[in-house]
Amino acid sequence: MYKEVTDIFFDLDHTLWDFEKNSALTFEKIFYKNRLNIELDKFLEAYVPINLDYWKLYREDKISKTELRYQRLKKTFDRVNIPVSDETIDLLALEYIEYLSSFSNLFPHTQDILEYLAPKYKLHIITNGFQETQEKKLKESNIHHYFNQIINSETAGVKKPHPYIFELALQKAQVSPKKALMVGDSIEADIMGAQSAGLQTLHFNAHKEPKHHLCKMINSLIEIKSIL
């Protein structure tokens, strides 16, 4: 398995960069900054699944970036019965993006596995995250230098799982699909999307999803050492 691989494409959020931990720290910061007395755990319990739902809508081009940033907050505040004005929500949405990429927590073993892979493979990123934040995330967490190509959905013009973003990544990396491996957390966006473009795939099970037969699944990045 994966014997012909020369290039590895990683998703960023929820795969290398610990989105949930960094997001929680960001909300803690902006709630304190704006003197909002909000129970963080209660807020996050509602926000996390709502955010995933709205990201799915964004991937499917059913909502805009602006709607995503506003609605995920509005829906969460409504669900936890905390009255917050639209003006405050707009401010929080802006500050959330401003501060999010300043936090740099990675999943366990991220640095170790990148250090292990870098001498053997060309490493790249394919991300649906916003262009203005993803480069900063990579730099702040000190992993930017590991990657040759960083493909972003905003510059590509389409989002994963659209085959074109993977085809563009292959073109930029100058590698054929059969020699490329996609590692990501999303079955829909990363695994099925990459497979539709002919890439090999490895599912990082960040969300404790049930077993499937789409491809090999790992629960820790360190497991890659026993595979590649």
Image: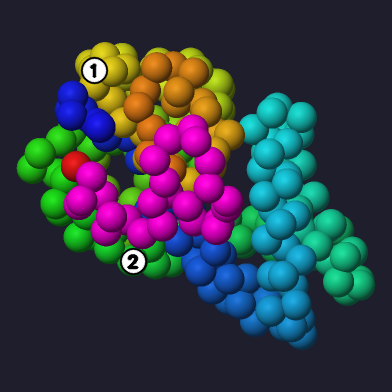
Query: Pointer 1: residues within 10 angstroms few (<14), some, or many (20+)?
Result: some
Give the distance between the C-alpha atoms of the residues marked 2 and 1, in whole angstroms.
Answer: 29 Å
Query: Pointer 2: residues within 10 angstroms few (<14), some, or many (20+)?
Result: some
Q: Nearer the viewer, residue 210 or 129?
A: 210
Q: Amino acid at mark 1?
A: Val
Q: Amino acid at mark 2?
A: Pro
Q: Nearer the viewer, residue 83 or 8?
A: 8
* 204, above or below 152, in the image: below
Q: What residue is disc 1 on? A: 175
In the rendered image, residue 224 lying in the magenta stretch gets the answer yes
Judged left or right of residue 110, residue 21 is right
Q: Quadrant of the N terminus?
A: top left
- Magenta span of residues: 204-227
Give x and y (percent) for residue 31: 68, 76
Disc 2, disc 1: CB below 8 Å? no
Q: Is residue 214 visible?
A: yes
Q: What residue is disc 2 on? A: 108
Residue located 83% across and 57% down the image: 74
